[in-house]
């Protein structure tokens, strides 16, 4: 299992397994980051 973390203004705002963060982001900053990224199927 791989873990990942998201930073905002130098502070960790979300920490957990990569799949969990990508599939169920809890912090608004992480949600905004993921919604801004294009989906591979849209490229």
Image (cartoon, helix red, strand yellow):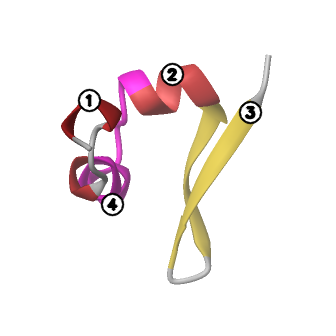
Which quarter of the figure has residue 2? top right
Residue tagged 4: 29
Residue 42 in the image: above or below residue 6? above
Label 2–label 1 contact, CB within 8 A: no
Which quadrant of the figure has residue 28?
bottom left
Disc sitting over residue 41 in the figure: 1
Earlier-in-chain disc, 4 versus 3:
3
Q: CA distance from mark 2 to mark 1?
A: 21 Å
| Magenta region | 23-34
Q: Residue furthest top?
A: 1
**Residue 28 vs residue 9: left or right?**
left
Q: Which element carries disc 1, helix, strand or loop?
A: helix
Q: Residue at x 51, y 21 (%)?
A: 20
> Is tag 3's residue or tag 1's residue first in the polypeptide sequence?
3
The residue mark sitting in front, 2 or 1, is 1
What residue sits right under mark 2 in the picture? Answer: 20
Alpha-carbon span between mark 3 and mark 1:
25 Å
């Amino acid at each position: 299992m791989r873990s990942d973390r998201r930073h905002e203004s130098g502070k960790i705002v979300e920490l957990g397994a990569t799949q969990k963060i990508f599939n169920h982001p809890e912090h608004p900053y992480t949600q905004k980051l993921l919604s801004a990224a294009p989906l591979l199927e849209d490229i």
